[in-house]
Image: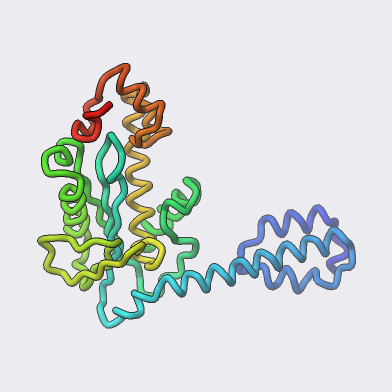
Amino acid sequence: MGESRKVTEIKAELQAAEDTMLPSFILQYKADQRTGVQKLVLLAEKRLKALEQECQRIERLKTYERQYADREYICGIDEVGRGPLAGPVVAAAVILPRDCRILYINDSKKLSAKKREELYEIIMRQAVAVGIGMAGPEKIDEINILQATYEAMRQAIQNLAVKPDILLNDAVTIPQVEIPQVPIIKGDEKSISIGAASIIAKVTRDRLMEEYDQIMPEYGFARNKGYGSKEHMEAVKKYGPSSIHRRSFIRNI
């Protein structure tokens, strides 16, 4: 049956195949001796192996979630934007469902912008609750970046639709929060909940900086996201600081 189809048709079938369809694709075409088809079967087998490895990695990312499985709502918290010269620091709090099967969640810095955008939409659809918090440049200048980060995290928790039973935090313990907390060093690489929060925070902040770029294009915010690139620092020297620059961060420019 397989050999009646052209290799180009089989290639198109593989390209369109979802991951769950790979085993049946391999079974259907494994006996087809044409070189082109055998190459496609090999590609399908590689995809399937990569998928199995990703499923195993995601299971390892649930170690902390399994450790606190007696708590109903486990919340991961992370922030983005402590280092930039401009824009807010953004925190996200994410409660994933217990049977979460979202693949490719990771530290947002290890993902492409396209992958982050894809995962953002999936997480927002499947999460039990998502909360976002922000602290702007004026607040950062007023109380310093660490305290502003804590404030953004507290906001994110308050903006959740349900109250968490435990917080898994990326490396920090948040002051003035009564919910039990577990600080995890490099948590966005070790906890699926924190990894999801890092993606939500990153995409939220990046989109915001792209909006600022429409208003003040001279600083290149869509490209640098407020970080201190050479182009960005030259623009600050040329045009002076904008309304979203952190004055405490640009004193030496």
- Residue farthest toward the front in the current orientation of the protein: 252
- In which quadrant of the rendered view does residue 38 lie? bottom right
Q: Give above or below for 222 relative to 10.
A: above
Q: Residue at x 17, y 61 (%)?
A: 174
Residue 42 falls left or right of residue 88: right
Near-viewer residue (211 or 65):
65
Q: Position of residue 110 (x, y in %)?
A: 47, 53
Looking at the picture, the colour scheme in use is rainbow
Horizontal side of 216 relative to 175 (left or right) equals right
On the picture, is 248 further left or further right than 5?
A: left
Residue reaching furthest to the bottom:
70
Taking depth in this image into account, of 224 and 162 the one nearest to the observer is: 224
Q: Nearer the viewer, residue 220 or 143?
A: 143
Q: Is residue 245 above or below residue 28?
A: above
Q: Quadrant of residue 40?
A: bottom right
Q: Where residue 244 sits in the image (x, y, percent)?
A: 24, 31
Question: Residue 169: image x %, image y %?
Answer: 27, 64
Q: Quadrant of the C terminus?
A: top left
Could you tell whether 114 is left or right of 63 in the image? Answer: right
In the rendered view, would you say 243 is above or below 33?
above
> Which residue is located at x 41 percent, y 63 percent?
189
Q: Quadrant of the N terminus?
A: bottom right
Give the total of numbered labels.
0
Q: Position of residue 87 (x, y in %)?
A: 27, 36
Q: Residue at x 35, y 34 (%)?
A: 228
Identify the residue at horizontal 19%, vertical 34% (top origin).
248
